[in-house]
Amino acid sequence: MGLFNKKKPDEDQEIMEQIKAPESESFENKEEEDAGFSMVVENASSMLDGTGVIVAGELYGTVNKGDTLYIYVPAVAPIETKVVAIETKQEERMVIAESATDSFTNLQLDLADKSVIKKYSVLHSQFLPEKFTAGMKIINPPLDGIIYGMGKFSKDNQFHATLSYWLSHALLLTPVQPEVTDDEAKRKLGFYMLKSQVRLAGTPEGKDSLVLPVFTDGPSLKKWTGIAKDNEHLPTQVLRFPEMLSLIKGSNTYAGIAINPFNKKPCTLPMPYLDTITGTKGYQRDFGNPEIIHEETLKAGSKFLLGIPKETEETREVRDLLAAYGDDEDDIQSINFMVKIEEETKNVRYLIVLGTDGDRAKAKVHMEAITKQLSPLVKEVRQIEFALRGEIPQVDQIAEKHQEQMLVYKAD
């Protein structure tokens, strides 16, 4: 999707954004493995004798009979299986083979039930761990695989829903140029850009469509030849989707992103497409957006209950994080932590009440920063709302009444 001209930032082109960089990857003295093979499943059927499942789709890379692969379905743990038999397209006809490469292929899998495979499931040779820890290589098998289907299935909403899920849950790599500074806490990073030869929706008139290059894994990034000299250290930043979106919106320069722009099938997504992802119910459920609730919410007739969060491992971790955040920020006077339950729907959200100096713009920055930090922790309650101390009397009254249980930080 789109062709690119490389732009390596000079003094005029460099985009500087102040962000925290707790995680990074380096290609110095690292042996990178090939991304393997992948397939976007177009259809699946059961063997007549019940001995397996046949899946069909366009194969990228090379698969061999007996190979282990993983099936990726949104919101489901990876399913491991083996390739029992291969039928691949050669010279315009389908033939039984021991291996297949870059062709339309039918794979017989060692599965008893085809129901575990949905349309646009991704088959991939790499396993995606549930969590990444320090020192682990960043990989995104389902996202790496699904983008190969963009050209063929670009008019199918179900395909876009699947792509959106894997993109919004991915950890992405992008190369950076750290600013030289004695104060590491205030370090700034310069981000690269590519010029798309296809004009993207939302690009201002008279402006080039510049995109942020992001990569699903190290091997895909290493295909960007010339960005670093042989054996030269190439610093990179690891971005979650909400962080990436905040970065490109904050710069007012990018028209979108390019995923794996130097692979066989790059994928360019304009800013309106990314905005659409954040508006889906699935994204709101999994990540939420920081919101300020005001007294008008009560006047409009919205009924909800406020309470003390149940004592769990998750709420303990949330309390500890909020306390540490307040301690690090001089303009935070207090943080209260409670739950908000909508009376009609019974929907449960975390409500975080910030006591600040009244600067709304500054408060919004704190809300976004807290949301990013909480995102990896929250699983039982995925939605987070914020209120400002002193704006909603009912909230303040409950916070005062249950201060011992709800107050997690107060400035000395």
Image (tube, rainbow, N blue to C red):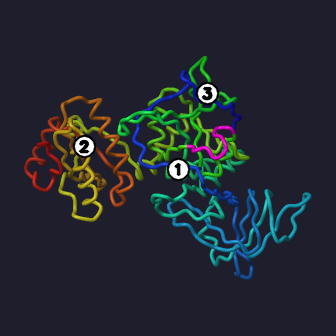
- Disc sitting over residue 209 in the figure: 3
- Disc sitting over residue 328 in the figure: 2
- Disc sitting over residue 25 in the figure: 1
Local SS, label 2 = helix
> Chief secondary structure of the magenta span?
loop
Residue 51 lies, with reference to residue 181, above or below; the image says below
Query: Where in the figure is residue 133, as x and y percent of width and height?
Result: 45, 60
Query: Where in the figure is residue 94, as x and y percent of width and height?
Result: 87, 64
The residue positioned farthest toward the left in the image shown = 401
Which badge, 2 or 3, comes first in the chain's sequence? 3
Identify which amino acid the numbered label 1 is placed on.
Glu
Magenta segment includes 114: no
Identify which amino acid the numbered label 3 is placed on.
Ser
Local SS, label 3 = loop
Magenta segment includes 227: yes
Crowd rating for badge 2 (residues with CA inside 10 Å; few <14, some 14–19, many 20+): few
Q: How many marks?
A: 3
Whether residue 135 sits left or right of residue 367 in the image: it is: right
Q: Start and end of the magenta stretch?
A: 226-234
Crowd rating for badge 1 (residues with CA inside 10 Å; few <14, some 14–19, many 20+): many
Which badge, 2 or 1, comes first in the chain's sequence? 1
Q: In the depicted view, which residue is nearer to us: 402 or 251?
A: 251
Query: Where in the figure is residue 85, as x and y percent of width and height?
Result: 77, 74
Which badge, 1 or 3, comes first in the chain's sequence? 1
Q: Residue at x 63, y 57 (%)?
A: 31
Identify which amino acid the numbered label 2 is placed on.
Asp
Residue 121 lies, with reference to residue 273, above or below; the image says below
Residue 228 lies, with reference to residue 114, above or below; the image says above
Query: Where in the figure is residue 200, as x and y percent of width and height?
Result: 62, 30
Crowd rating for badge 3 (residues with CA inside 10 Å; few <14, some 14–19, many 20+): many
